[in-house]
Amino acid sequence: AEVEETLKRIQSHKGVIGTMVVNAEGIPIRTTLDNSTTVQYAGLLHQLTVKAKSTVRDIDPQNDLTFLRIRSKKHEIMVAPGNLAFNFICKASLYLTA
Amino acid sequence: MPSWRLVLCPDELLEQLTRETNPNRLPNRLVADTLEVSRDLHKEKSCQTASIATAEASAQVRKHADAQVQTEAPVPVTVLPLSQHDTSRLTAFLRRVEAMVIRELNKNWQSHAFDGFEVNWMEPQQTVSCLHTLGYPPAQGQGLHVTSVSWNATGSVLACAYGRLDDGDWSTLKSFVCAWNLDRRGLNPQQPSAVVEVPSAVMCLAFHPTQPSHVAGGLYSGEVVVWDMSRSEDPLLWRTGLTDDTHTDPVCQVIWLPEPRHSHRFRLLSAAADGKVLLWQGAGTGQLQLAEGFALLVQQLPRSTKLKKPSRGETEVGVTAVAFSSFDSSLFILGTEGGFPLKCSLAAEEVALTRMPSSVPLRAPAQFTFSPHGGPVYSVSYSPFHRNLFLSAGTDGHIHLYSVLQAQPLTSLQLSHKYLFAVRWSPVRPLVFAAASGEGDVQLFDLQKSSQKPTVSIVQTQDGSPVYCLEFNSQQTQLLAAGDANGTVKVWQLSTAFTEQGPRETEDLDQLAAEVAT
């Protein structure tokens, strides 16, 4: 219940297109997008997040990745990595249309 | 018996000898009398190659191993349901992360960090340049025009059809369909990689959407033919023949349509000036059979706009152009000789009141009539990005941008004082289209930059002869092919401005459609 409420709060934020929660293996657990998009994003972004995390750790072992943002021409993808268990991926549009 | 000896001697000596021995006859190499040459004029030489060293060696594998590989069909990954234990962990995680995500989203809206930041990952091309100038000299020698160009499914082969657009002989005009493979090395612009000779002038071409070598053409005689360009002997695959079903006027456009139930098989739609729009299916023996047919009659046109009163008797409406919607596969727009575009549907049920013989009952497809141009419409093009917008180009030199929802055009642009022969939307930029004019130039319009005058005007022919057809390459989106009345096809490379989508274009197109409609 609280899980759904939290997700709904984020999803209803202005400009958010879709959100999903992915577990440590890259398998999506909760999503608001359609299945094929979800699977595609989860697979691609999981690898990128793991790489980003290891990059930050390699540069400074005391440091850790807090947030990852990928900005493209049409959208922005935001990834909030969790502990070993979960990652949070959110896709937002860059422009607000009336 | 005198003995003969053959002697090799230099020419001067030979002449001297023959002159001495047979002064009245012509000298020849074999001197008839025995002659002895005092001096020995031949030398001996011999040669021999140096000895070649050879050696023998053999090899053998000491050990080998066998391995087999097999792929498995990938198991589709589905969303996992959660167990109870995990739900509590998920709640804790989300509680932690939510504040951060909301904060970042808010920062996004207020951030000016990326304002005006544009990325160019590739070398931008600043201008439009001509990549290739292709022509087939035998066709150009006959004074044939390029009536139609088409790119194939992979975007690497360009085919053009030769014919004449101003007059046409029934019996004597032979024409050609030529194809060039632009990705091949050693491309000779005057030598197409495949040429098909056709007994009648070809008026339109269309490559098959998935088979890279099949191309359909509509002939001046009303026939529709499909060729396989990869076969050099006997490329003819299917033809309609001259039956009661075939068109009685030149075919103006052929289009491949996916079958409604089997989307990997295709049917061929042909439209001609006799008012018929026919759907052909390939039957086993190389014969195209009529699957469905439509006929347009003036009496059956919906009266959404005022048209000139038809004369007595049933009059067919000559069709000059067809464009299908990419959003709704049964909706299509027809351009007519009367200058008014028509909205039609493949699913129309009303029977056409025509006396033309046909093996399949003909239906009347028209649902809506748009307000006319000042002359026949030669080309229509449906926007690939917006479900309601289409362009039509006519002989009055104007381009009309219509919305399917209303009869009056949204805007009307005058591009030329002569005819306009072709108009096409760009497959990548929602606000860009190109038009081919009778003044010999190709005009590229970018509605984002200016809605009144063309952004770029490319001069194709030096002598002002008209450009008859143009096509964008949907696989290599920077290429545009245009064919003109001199029989040459030029492939233009567009600048990056025309091929990369800017950030807000789809929204701008929606806005254009909405604001001009009111």
Image (cartoon, coloured by chain):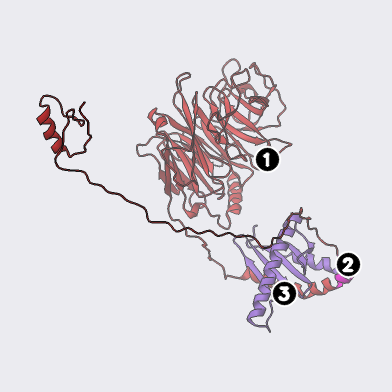
Chain colours: A purple, B red
User: What's under tag 2, amino acid-wise?
Assistant: Ser
Left or right, residue B344 beside residue B162: right
Q: Quadrant of residue B491?
A: top left
Magenta stretch in the rendered image: B82-88
Location of residue B68 in the rendering, given as x and y in whole percent from the top left corner: 73, 56
Residue at x 46%, y 53% (from the top left corner): B495
Query: CB atoms at circles 1 and 2 under 8 Å apart?
Result: no
Residue position for label 1: B328
Residue A54 disc label: none
> To which chain does the residue with label 2 belong?
B
Vertical placement of residue B280 versus B452, above or below: above
Vertical placement of residue B501 versus B366, above or below: below
Location of residue B46 in the rendering, given as x and y in whole percent from the top left corner: 30, 49
Left or right, residue A22 beside residue B190: right
User: What's under tag 1, amino acid-wise?
Assistant: Asp
Residue position for label 2: B83
Location of residue B428 in the rendering, given as x and y in whole percent from the top left corner: 56, 50
**In what element is the residue under mark 1?**
loop
